[in-house]
Amino acid sequence: MRFKLNRYLLIFLVLIFAETNLLSELKDRVLVVRNINSPISISVSNYYMAQRNIDKVIDINCVDAALSSNNENIDYNNYLQKIENPIKEYLSNHSEIDYIVLTKGIPIRLINVPNGPWGGLYSADSYIAGIEYNKIHKTQIVLISDINYGAEYKGEALANRFWNSSERFSHSKFGGYLVTRLDGYTENDAKSLVDRAIKAEIALDSISPKNVILLDECPAYGSTSLADVPYSITKNQTDKDTLRITAESAYGSFNSDLQLAYNNLSNQGIPTTLENTELFTNALSNLMGYCSWGSNDAKFVLSTYNSLTFSFGAIGETAVSTSARTFLPTTGGQSLVADLINQGITGMKGYVNEPLLQAIASPSILFDRYSKGWTLAESFYAASNLIKWQDIVIGDPIATAYPLFINSVNDNLDELNLNELNQILKNDDINSRISIYSLSGKLLKELSTIDFNDIEFFNEFNSGVYILIINNSSAKKAYKIIK
């Protein structure tokens, strides 16, 4: 019995190797920041490190943001002394760090930052993401203003070098850090983000996500050409060193980006629903992704928003200016990402202050990268134009919910059921080695056909999809096995 080596098998083997190395290294690239003045921060940090087997942590000592909304703010000078400088000192001796995890109890908002909008308001998380951003590469400053938000709405941000990258993130390549936080209304909400991420990865051992990604347009805002999305802040800029945003981008561009995301995901066979009527969303459950205008939708219904539920690994974004203004229980105001965290989402992006539409994560980039097996943090940051601005990314940064190689290889492999596989193996006249992999690239079992009688060894696996490689002295062959 002889097998023909093909290019899809080669791609598969390369991606298996890359994915195995990537997963083994991810936890070693994560730094956890723990506020020793906050019992909740200590508890959430310790829980995350135990679940992920992470040992890199730095302790800071600042106000406990879990206690009051006032404590969610920190003066810029105090931030430098109590948060940024200790982190910078640690990072100076740990070049391997790419991801930084903040925890509930660490302030979310900086106040009194020089050259900041409305008296110097910025996201603490986004500021940390830009630590020493200009040390490695040339940095583009972005001057931001919009008279529609008043004369005091003037600030500076940085253009994100990682925006729309096709190459995966490293600090050494792009500068800065991918900063996320484990937060929510309660300590349990924050810890649940970790549990959901891990459960999503466990599920990848046998099946790729089949639940729906829901994209909800607001037709009242119109649309732009699909050729103009995703929106880049560098477009039509003459000065490439200093970029300028003087007005919010057209609302229709976000609708068009939702349409582009739907087109791309559907073409990849990823279950996706586009709601493009005046109806605000659908009261759906077990969503794998969610993107909408939130409370900025002309037909927003809070009860519908609060009825959404999510699968393990689900991520989302809403085009809402102050969706991350607080992580404490509150009433009134715009829709909050904390509600969706409480309702079961695994990752979310929000904003502590008006960011302009240019800062909202591009849904077409976000879901493209995530569905290709990139981490939660990589997906959100690749979709975001700005850092050192108003952004906050919620969730375990190294969470993944889709196989890294599934879109590149899986659809090109011959598909067999167990009876067909059984016949092939029984006809094997050479001592072949059988290797069985999960869709996430994990080696599950190896055995030899010389001892093969039947396919009872598959009984130990759950129903799902697996990749099987038969390797002998003359050739290799890969199959997609459906159980």
Image (cartoon, grey):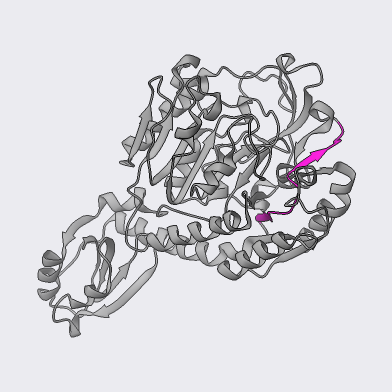
* Residue 338 appearing in the image: yes
**Position of the C terminus by quadrant:** bottom left
The stretch of residues the image draws in magenta is: 98-114
**Position of the N terminus by quadrant:** bottom left
**Drawn side of residue 462 relative to residue 48, left or right:** left
Q: Residue at x 49, y 38 (%)?
A: 306
Report the residue that reaches farthest toward the bottom: 451
Say which of 209 and 308 sits in front.
308
- Residue 196 place in picture, x, y as percent: 48, 57
- Residue 439 place in picture, x, y as percent: 35, 60
Location of residue 391 (image quadrant): top right
**Drawn side of residue 144 relative to residue 62, left or right:** left
Location of residue 266 (image quadrant): top left
Say which of 108 and 116 sits in front.
108
* Residue 364 appearing in the image: no
**Residue 104 on the magenta segment:** yes
